[in-house]
Amino acid sequence: MLAQYLPILIFLALSTTIGIVLVFLGGLLGPTRPDSEKLSPYECGFEAFEDSRTKFDVRYYLVAILFIIFDLEITFFLPWALALDVLGMFGIAAMFVFVIELVIGYVVIWKRGALEWE
């Protein structure tokens, strides 16, 4: 039974080793020219200019969360497309309902102004 998992273990060991070696070589051979611009703190899409506890616009996070939600929902298309011949008309109808829900959700957040920056 271990022989069945041996190629997977070899692949994992080899890919881990290559990843560690590449990170080490990049840090060793890469240019290091720090200046004040590179060493300045940078967070949330804008430069830190006040105390970290000050309030700022939450729309940055809202757009990021909306992107993640729609991106994750779109990933459901790949398994559906791969199993479409098995699912038949039921699969097409189910995906049609899913796409309609996505479009309704997108229209709702668009109408509420969640995608507006100004």
Image: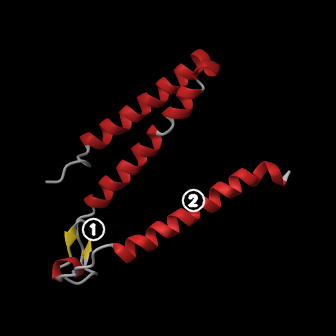
- The quarter of the image holding the C terminus is bottom left
Of tags 1 and 2, which is closer to the observer?
2
User: Which x, y percent locates residue 96?
Assistant: 47, 23
* Spatial CA span between label 1 and label 2: 32 Å
Q: Residue furthest left?
A: 118
User: Which x, y percent locates residue 89?
Assistant: 57, 15
Amino acid at dot 1: Cys
Image side of residue 84 versus residue 57, left or right: right
Q: Quadrant of residue 47?
A: bottom left
Image side of residue 110 versus residue 69, left or right: left
Among the two numbered marks 1 and 2 on one chain, the one whose residue lies closer to the N terminus? 2
At 30% from the left and 36% from the top, the residue drawn is: 107
At 69% from the left and 52% from the top, the residue drawn is: 8
Say which mark, if any, is on residue 15: 2
Q: Mark 1 highlights which residue?
A: 44
User: Which x, y percent locates residue 43?
Assistant: 27, 72
Q: Residue furthest right?
A: 1
Closest to the observer, 69 or 55: 69
